Each structure stands twice: as C-alpha cells, then as structure tokens.
Image (cartoon, coloured by chain):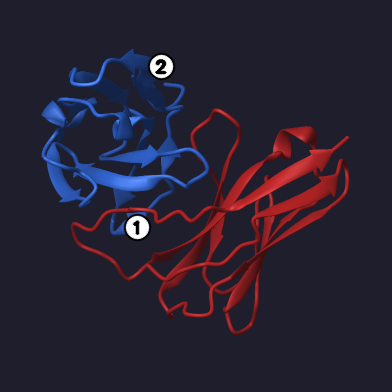
Amino acid sequence: DTGVSQDPRHKITKRGQNVTFRCDPISEHNRLYWYRQTLGQGPEFLTYFQNEAQLEKSRLLSDRFSAERPKGSFSTLEIQRTEQGDSAMYLCASSFRDRGLNTEAFFGQGTRLTVV
Amino acid sequence: DAKTTQPNSMESNEEEPVHLPCNHSTISGTDYIHWYRQLPSQGPEYVIHGLTSNVNNRMASLAIAEDRKSSTLILHRATLRDAAVYYCILRDGAYSGAGSYQLTFGKGTKLSVIP
C-alpha cells in the first residue's frame, strides 16, 4: 500500500452533469476526510468518516454533494448538477485513531474538477 | 480551531537554512501546532507537530516560543524539492470521542528556493 489513491486525477464535465470521485485510503486507516481546494487557497474541510459512519459535514457540503464510505473502506464523493463554482481540486485524506491518539493525515494527490 | 498568521511568501537560497514563522497569539493550552506542506500539483504532506517542546524529525525542526504564541519551522538545508506552500495549523488535542482530525488550513507561506 503506497498511500491514499484518488481516481480520476482530472475530470472535465459540462455544467449540470453529475460526477463521482473515488478515494482509496491507506488500508488500516479508520478515518477518511474530503477537502476542497480552489486556486490560491488552502484546502477546506468538507466531510469526515470514521469507518463507515459519516460523522461531520461542513456547511460547504451543499445538498448537491453526497459522500459515502460503504464497508468503511473506499469512499465516493458525488456532485449532482455541477456548477462552474464547483471547479476545484477535491482532496481525500486518511488517518488512524488508536486509543484516543490522533495520527497525522495522509493526503491523496486529488481530483481536479473543471466544470465548463 | 484557533487562527494562525503566516507571511504570504518567502525566498531562500538552495542549501541555506530556512526559518518559516507562524504567529498564533490565541493558542489555547491544549492546541497542538502542526505543519503541513503542499508541493505543486500534490496533496498536502505532514511535516511535523508539537505542543510545548521543540521537536525534530528527518524533515524539519519545530521551535516553539516559551509563551507558545509563535513557532518557527526550520528546514536545515533547503533543496529545490522544498519549494512548496507551508501551512501552520492549530489542532485542539483535547478534542476526543468521535471528533475528527479536521484541519483548518489558511493560505500558508509559499516558499521559493533559488538555485
């Protein structure tokens, strides 16, 4: 296992179309996060899973966004009816929590979405 | 999470030490200081973190002021591969239970390394 894997790396879609991204975390990590990053800004938190449970959602995650993590392994992030404002880099990260201690987050290389 | 303040950009000559400052005057007693960096076209990468004492690892050193209101990330010998955006982040270590490891990124410091 070489790290967090995201697919696809790039996606160009027309406004109004639905898109889905996949994230495969580091295998023993029980925590998975999605972030969004626009040009010139730092990443912004979207949502967080502990195993298969989605425990936190940012107000940035509108109704058009949905994330899942079935069986607590890989995760998908779907955006419905894409808008030009959704154009960004979508980053996935994973980490491990053991005995109340948080370890650092490991990020994937991201999926760059362009809505035209 | 408490807010941090970093310079927008810095330059360093290759093979010289680099000191990246971060101010966090509203830090609480349970806030850990984390540093991540983001190379061009990559996701962020963990660098180092600490609470009160200075910390060293293979990538960098973290010097924390006695009052903890500021810290400095030290790259002992900058290489071209160190050119990146460096983020200083505070994370509440008292957050427990089902709480997440959510990171609140600012704009960071863009480090340029001159050959």
**Amino acid type of disc 2?**
His
Q: Is residue B11 left or right of residue B8?
A: right
Q: Position of residue B28 (x, y in %)?
A: 43, 79
Q: Secondary structure at mark 1?
A: strand
Q: Position of residue B70 (x, y in %)?
A: 61, 74
Residue depicted at 53% across the width and 53% down the height: B107
Colour in which chain B is drawn: red
Looking at the image, which is closer to me, A79 or B52?
A79
Classify A110 as above or below B86: above
Residue B91: assigned label: none
Residue A10: assigned label: 2
**Amino acid type of disc 1?**
Leu
Foreground label between 2 and 1: 2
Q: Which chain is blue?
A: A
Residue depicted at 23% across the width and 45% down the height: A48
Q: Is disc 2 in contact with disc 1, using a CB cutoff of under 8 Å?
A: no
Q: Quadrant of residue B112?
A: top right
Residue depicted at 27% across the width and 15% down the height: A14
The residue wearing badge 1 is: A101
Read off the chain for label 1.
A
Q: Secondary structure at mark 2?
A: strand
